[in-house]
Structure formats: C-alpha cells, structure tokens
Image (tube, grey):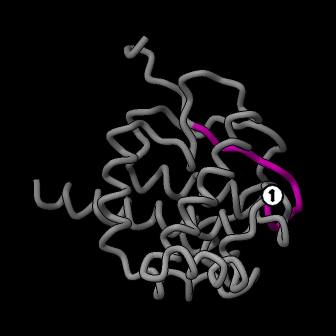
C-alpha cells in the first residue's frame, strides 16, 4: 500500500512536470500549438502583478486551460482524456500535489526549448516516431501509471522534436460505458 502511494505521488509529480514542459513547448512563441505565452519570463512578470505569490502556478493553470481546449478540439472525442484533461478525481489529486510543489524548481526545468525537450526525453526514457494527430496511448484506468507517463512524454517529445502535432489520449474504460 505504501509503495502504491509513493508510486502515485511520483507519477503525479511527473504529470505536473510534463504539463509544464509540454505547455512551455506548445506556447505561441515556441511551437505555436496554443495562443498563450504565460510560461516565459514576460508571462510570469505579467501574472506577478495579479498573483504575486502564485504567479508560476497561475501560469501553469492558464496554459493548461489553453492546451486543454486545443487538445479537446483536435480529439473531438467525448469521454477521452489527455495530459491537460484528466478525470475529475485525478485532476483533484494533481491540484493538491501542485499546491505542495516548489514552482521555482519546476520552472528551472524549462528555462529553454532544449531544456524542456530534455525534460520530456528524460520522462519518456525512449525515442519514438509519433504520428500526426490523435493517437490512443492507453485507457482511463491506466492513466496514473509510470507507463502512461513514458508514453505521453515519448509522443510529445517526438512531436516537438519533429515539428508535428500529436495528441496522445486515453480512451474510456470499456466497462465504464
């Protein structure tokens, strides 16, 4: 039981780091997947005027919303989940984890395009060739697993490295219908 909790905690931390890296790489000034630039220095300075103590967390949340909208539109599948839209209980766990994170340390992982790509490569632990467009990488019940982290990171790393838009997602469990 303790090992499961530790494993889940590690996976949640990796999801936050992956959201940050993918969010950064997908910004308008980077790959241009979404029209949002809150995760760079200018975006953080802008948010610090309104959210002086939580500007970095606010930047990640705002970028998550922009990325979620783009992913939802690309997927067009009701009931599917992706890096930026998880089942509500998982989103709650992610939010609780985010509140405990050292956002300054996390942002040090994405100081440049190369650093963010390296973060994804480290999380992926393998190189693949991701297809353009939506690609199913698992099912809902397997989202909070190390395998899911590796699959998502590998697809996003490939997409940003090769300059294509790939949208990895999780299908609903068959017994949930």
Q: Is residue 91 above or below residue 141?
A: below
Q: Report the magenta residues as a range.
A: 160-169
Residue furthest top as drawn = 177
Q: Is residue 50 left or right of residue 24?
A: left
Nearer to us in this view, 85 or 35: 35
Residue furthest right as drawn = 163
Q: Is residue 99 magenta?
A: no
Residue furthest left as drawn = 1
Nearer to us in this view, 42 or 14: 42
Residue drawn at (41%, 56%) of the image? 146
What count of labels does the image hold? 1
Q: Which residue is mark 1?
A: 35
Residue drawn at (56%, 29%) of the image? 80
Residue drawn at (53%, 24%) of the image? 79
Q: How far across and down, in percent of the image, does residue 48 sit?
A: 56, 81
Quarter-of-image position of residue 127: bottom right
The quadrant the C terminus occupies is top left
Q: Is residue 43 above or below residue 78?
A: below
Q: Is residue 127 above or below residue 89?
A: below
Quarter-of-image position of residue 22: bottom right
Question: Are there few (<14), some (14-19), or many (20+) residues within 10 Å of tag 1?
Answer: some
Q: How far across and down, in percent of the image, does residue 139 sit?
A: 48, 32
Q: Is residue 99 left or right of residue 73?
A: left
Residue drawn at (38%, 14%) of the image? 175
Quarter-of-image position of residue 81: top right
Q: How far across and down, in percent of the image, does residue 166 sit?
A: 77, 47
Q: Secondary structure at mark 1?
A: loop
Q: Is residue 30 left or right of residue 139?
A: right
Q: Is residue 54 left or right of residue 21?
A: left
Q: How far across and down, in percent of the image, does residue 12 sit?
A: 37, 60
């Amino acid at each position: 039981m303790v090992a499961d909790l530790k494993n889940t905690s590690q996976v949640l931390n990796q999801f936050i780091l992956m959201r940050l890296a993918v969010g950064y790489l997908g910004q308008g000034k980077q790959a241009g997947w979404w029209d949002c630039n809150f995760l760079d220095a200018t975006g953080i300075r802008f948010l610090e005027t309104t959210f002086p103590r939580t500007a970095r967390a606010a930047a990640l949340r705002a970028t998550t919303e922009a990325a979620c909208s783009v992913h939802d539109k690309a997927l067009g599948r009701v009931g599917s989940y992706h890096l930026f839209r998880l089942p509500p209980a998982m989103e709650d766990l992610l939010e609780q984890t985010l509140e405990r994170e050292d956002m300054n340390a996390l942002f040090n992982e994405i100081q440049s395009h190369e650093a963010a790509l390296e973060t994804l490569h480290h999380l992926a632990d393998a190189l693949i060739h991701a297809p353009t467009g939506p690609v199913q990488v698992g099912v809902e019940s397997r989202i909070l697993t190390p395998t899911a982290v590796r699959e998502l990171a590998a697809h996003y790393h490939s997409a940003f490295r090769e300059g294509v838009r790939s949208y990895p997602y999780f299908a609903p469990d068959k017994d949930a219908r």
